[in-house]
Amino acid sequence: MSSFERREITGFSNPTVKYLRSLREKKHRKREGKFLAEGLRLLTDARECGKLPETLVMAAKRDAHPLLDELEAAVAGAGGEIIETTPDILTKITGKDNPQTVAGVFAEFDTSLSSLDRSQGPIWMVAQALRDPGNLGTMLRTCDAVGAGGLILIDDCADPFSVEAVRASMGAVFTQQIGRATWDEFVPWLRGGAGQLVAASLRDAVDYRGAPYSAPCFVFVGNESRGLPEAYEDECDLRVTMPMKGRADSLNAAVAGAVLAYEVLASQ
Amino acid sequence: MSSFERREITGFSNPTVKYLRSLREKKHRKREGKFLAEGLRLLTDARECGKLPETLVMAAKRDAHPLLDELEAAVAGAGGEIIETTPDILTKITGKDNPQTVAGVFAEFDTSLSSLDRSQGPIWMVAQALRDPGNLGTMLRTCDAVGAGGLILIDDCADPFSVEAVRASMGAVFTQQIGRATWDEFVPWLRGGAGQLVAASLRDAVDYRGAPYSAPCFVFVGNESRGLPEAYEDECDLRVTMPMKGRADSLNAAVAGAVLAYEVLASQ
């Protein structure tokens, strides 16, 4: 093993444990500009995307794993901090019943619209007032699957850096671009370049199958309860309708976005 | 207002409150054979499907609503129990931050395979070892949207009658048939009638777009972490592959099922 410094923490009341645990709450993440990600697979995905945690927290007495060794060496090589702790404390930090053997603290990414490169993907997903961090993470995961450029969050959405969203994204939080903006900021940005804004809608819409999608296509999904505001639908370049054969008039937001995104992908 | 009896409960320690609250736990639901559903919209959906709660719990000082009056009259007319309580207690019962003004206790439905009528829909969804009740409810909601016959749960799945699953189903728990079985029970049942078993798979598979689907088509989705066991995939009549353009090799289970179900629907 190399000679870099490594701290051991065994007490629940240790200030570092309290600090790490506090990152599960949005106000602390926002103040610190940091977030937590857990699990060897996810942290390896991050590393392979060039994103290393500033702090790596590992369970003592864990099973050895070559990927974990590589991760540890990379973090140490970049001047990061390595902490060993008990599985119980790791569970307390991540709040997960069956704890992973490793977690990392990352600096939050820039999510301004000006940081986005729309040429990076022919599909983008856009969500408005999405409240559920699980839906948000699932949409990031779908973005990865369809080869999207990223996810843009409009108005007051769940936090993409929450533990739940990061977990549901299955690593896509590290591979996808993420933007956050108000509607009034988003529209000029969108119209400042190529881009077709498409939403599922019940009015004045064409069948979503074989609709005239064009790249880059921005697939727009609304709030879980209320859907998209009418004025936002009006701004769309294309409104499409999906079959609703049953009693309900809508799908889960992440499901609707995925069915639509896969249709756009098939059209390209 | 009619003259049927109505109980008022104002104490948190009331045994009825404890009983209702206990139905949030699986072991109590299983023992009692009852489950909770909340919200006027969901309970109205249930009523319109001919399913009435045995007990209706309403918040005192709620806003009047004609659908609530109809619901109350229907429950009373069927000999059900009506309870009025405080919003705080209703919150405690359902465990939801922004409480609904009404909740109901329903008898669990028969979920044996022999209770299912496969002729009721050209599409069915089948999930194996699905662990997340939110995914389960979302799949029921998708079933409703594609006009499916129902959802069949194989092996050890989350409970379709959990508060989270019922909530995520947006009422589809009342409109869709639900089956529960082991794999060894399911296969003979499936092969005892018409039915094509289809799964997304990475091996020996054809493109999911335009694949030769046939009704009734059983769309088969595996566990969130492990996917389907190889032997289960082998039993499938058709294995299809969906594009995965990114780093991940799978979608969220409910998303994968929905994209596939919408493709089957479009082929019909």
Image (cartoon, coloured by chain):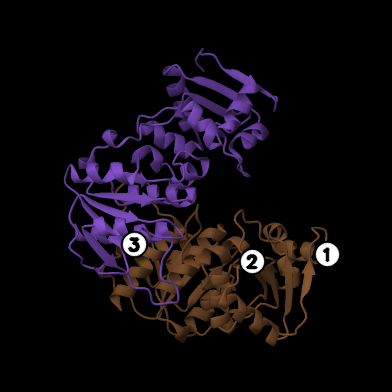
Chain colours: A brown, B purple
Task: Report the quarter where the N terminus of chain A lies.
Answer: bottom right
Kind of residue indicated by mark 1: Pro
Kind of residue indicated by mark 2: Arg
Q: Which subunit holds the residue at mark 3?
A: B
Would you place residue B70 above or below residue A268 in this image? above
Relative image position of residue A10 (x, y in whole percent): 79, 62
Q: What distance separates the C-alpha of mark 1 from that of mark 2? A: 23 Å
**Which label belongs to residue A62?**
2
Closer mark to the observer between disc 1 and disc 2: 2
Question: Residue beneath label 3, please?
Answer: B259
Closer mark to the observer between disc 1 and disc 3: 1
Relative image position of residue B254 (x, y in whole percent): 41, 56
Task: Report the quarter where the C terminus of chain A lies.
Answer: bottom left
**Element carrying mark 1:** helix
Is B76 left or right of B127, judged from the image as shown?
Answer: right
Closer mark to the observer between disc 2 and disc 3: 2
